[in-house]
Amino acid sequence: MRVTLGRPLNILRLAKAAFTFAGGARYAAWKIRRHSGISIEVSPFAEKHPLLAAPPVLFRLWRRGLFRLR
C-alpha cells in the first residue's frame, strides 16, 4: 500500500511546501530538479500563485517523462 500511495503523497507534500514559507515554489522546483534532474522555470506568477500555475507545469513534466512508473 505504501508503494502505491508514495508518489501521490510526495506530490501533496510538495504542494504543502509551496505554501508553508516564502519561496515555496522555488523550493518545490529545486526538489524536483534535485531528485529527477529535470529543471523547472518558476515564473513570478507561479511564485505568487503556486496552485494555479501547477497544472501546466505538471503537464509539461508529464510530457518529459517525470511520472513514469519505475
Image (cartoon, helix red, strand yellow):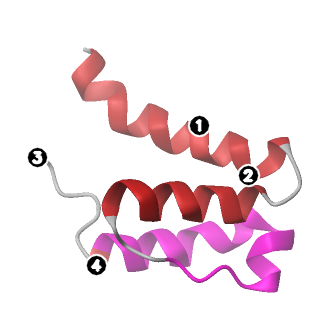
Q: Which residue is mark 1?
A: 13
**Residues at marks 4 and 2 touching, judged by CB atoms closer than 8 Å:** no
Which of the 4 quarters of the picture holds residue 20? Answer: top right
Q: Amino acid at mark 4?
A: Arg
What is the magenta segment's predominant secondary structure? helix
Q: Which dot marks residue 44?
A: none
Q: Amino acid at mark 3?
A: Arg
> Is tag 4's residue or tag 2's residue first in the polypeptide sequence?
2
Q: Which dot marks residue 18?
A: 2
Which of the 4 quarters of the picture holds residue 51? Answer: bottom right
Q: Which residue is mark 3?
A: 70
Write down the region rendered in magenta: 40-62
Q: CA distance from mark 2 to mark 3?
A: 26 Å
- Give the residue drawn at x 52%, y 77%: 40
Q: Which residue is mark 4?
A: 63
- From what the image shows, is residue 36 above or below residue 41? above
Q: Is 34 in front, or is 28?
A: 34
* Circle 1 SS class: helix
Eye-nearest disc, 4 or 2? 2
> Is tag 2's residue or tag 1's residue first in the polypeptide sequence?
1
Where residue 60 sits in the image (x, y, percent)? Answer: 40, 80
Looking at the rendered structure, the number of numbered marks drawn on it comes to 4
